[in-house]
Image (cartoon, helix red, strand yellow):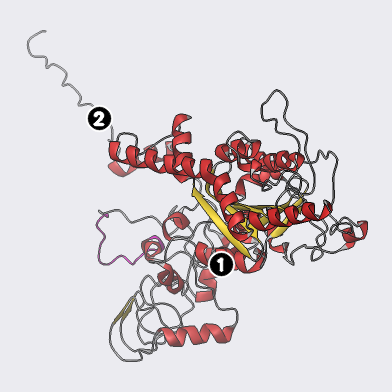
Amino acid sequence: MAPGKKSPAAKPRAAKPKPTKGKKAKDAASTVKAAPKRPIPQRVVDYAKKRGMQVADEDSNDDGTNKPPKKRPKRKRSEALAYDDLVPLEMPPPRDFGATFAAKSTAHFTWGAPSVARPTNQQDIRDDRESASSSKGKGKQVAFPSSSKSKGKQVASPSNNKGKGKQIASPSSSKGKGKQVASPSDDLALVDLTIGAPPSRTMTPDEDAGSDFLRLPTEIRNKIYKLILVADHPIRVQQGWSTVYPRTRPRVTTSILRVSKMVRREATNVLYGENTFLYLLRETASPPVDKEIVVQHPLAVVDDQLSEHSDDEYNCDDLAVGFNHNTEVDIDIPRVGHKFRHIVIVAEPNRSETGYLHSMANAINVFRQLKPIRPRIHTITIEITPTRDLDTGEVTFVNFFQKTSAVMKALRGLPCQYINVVVKAGQEEKTFTINMTHAAILRRARRGESDIWKGDHVAQMNRNARAGEAQEKLVRLPADIRDFFESQNPESEWTDEEDDGDDDDTF
């Protein structure tokens, strides 16, 4: 550059105006789409209109059940409370806490169904509220379930209060002037009464039919069943224990069996377990084949010989006799035979032929061969009236109880506890009782059933001794029957009369 010339001064660049902080935030906010406003529910609008409250244009997503955050942004004291600040203080709309639960609720598994019925009219509602509380004093009340009329500050008090003060976001229909916060509904009082009650299970429709009766203890129900279903005298049956004898039907009402399945199951056990069933031998059976016991069907009748006193016992007119409006009197032995506990078999004096011996054995084998449930007969009673055979002079019915007879084989295999043999001779009778309990236990143990005394040698020895005594009584039974009959009917008198008659014929 030539001397004396000044270099051109650099012009300062004009600084661009920096955007202010507010403008940048405004531009950034303009790029973000505003969230759609959540419409205010109509019930909130109606609620605020009814209470004289003002509803804000915008509402939060909180429906009153969410807890407020622990930390809130600081607010200037000069700012007024917004609507969203008051929403968490409101209680949700009143709900029904009566005798029902929500569809997905599991509260009934913990507390059971409420047992307190809600009042049905307004008078009952007023009575319940008045009896719940008689407090009308002044002062502060906290969580008191009544419609009190106190003055002053109230906290967590139900509706219908008439105090003085300021009202803040109360959902109840209170007309008071006292300060009220988080007021619950009146229905909560009913919930408190059910807490602590025992859990109750839901009953099936079948059980609900007799729910009041089924709430009784089992012992009481069994006594009621006995009063209704147990006859005063033994129930006479025929045709292999499957039919009730028409003429001597007991006056037993069985309508209770149709109440429900549970009642039928309980009552059936009493009907067949507590009654005594009497089987009168009226038919003969053919002897077994190949010297083995053959369980012949009880309906099989061979050469039926009726006594002189039984000509009219099988009259067809007897079928018209009613059984307390129940025409069906058949007994399904394969299905309910295991419920029998007391059975009686009666042989009349003229039923001492061999055919009746096998008929008696078949009557016993009906229960011996029951499957799949084996019976547990408590007592089997056999009644006989022996006489003296005019041809041989032997005592009748003694051969029924010989060791190799079909009757004795059936008795040894019958699951029972006691065997009673009633022998009638003239005006006297004698009962021979044989305890078969221990023999039955040994028989079940041999079949592989559980035995709690298996390792106890003392109990095993005692059981074997008792079972041996029962077997000895069975073996001695024919001699005992003969001795008792001869003690009541001496044989010498009959022999002397026959000898005197023969002497008279010689002259």
Q: Quadrant of the C terminus?
A: bottom right
Instruction: Give the percent coordinates (x, y) of residue 321.
Output: 86, 63
Quarter placement of the N terminus: top left
Under circle 1, the secondary element is helix
Q: Quadrant of residue 329?
A: bottom right
- In primary-sequence order, the first of circles 1 and 2 is 2
Kind of residue sitting beneath label 1:
Lys
Residue 276 seen in this snapshot: no
Residue occupying image coordinates x 64% and y 64%: 230
Q: Nearer the viewer, mark 1 or mark 2?
A: 1
Q: Residue at x 85, y 51 (%)?
A: 306
Does dot 2 land on a helix, a strand or a loop? Answer: loop
Q: Is 399 in front, or is 316?
A: 399
Q: What amino acid type should be assigned to the residue bearing mark 2? A: Ala
User: Which of the labelled discs sits on residue 14, or is there none?
Assistant: 2
Query: Seen in the image, is 28 located left or right of residue 34?
Result: left
Residue shown at the point (48%, 60%) measured from the top left: 200
Span shown in magenta: 72-84
Q: Does residue 223 appear in this view?
A: yes
Which residue position is annotated with label 1?
A: 223
Residue 55 x, y percent position in the rendering? 48, 66
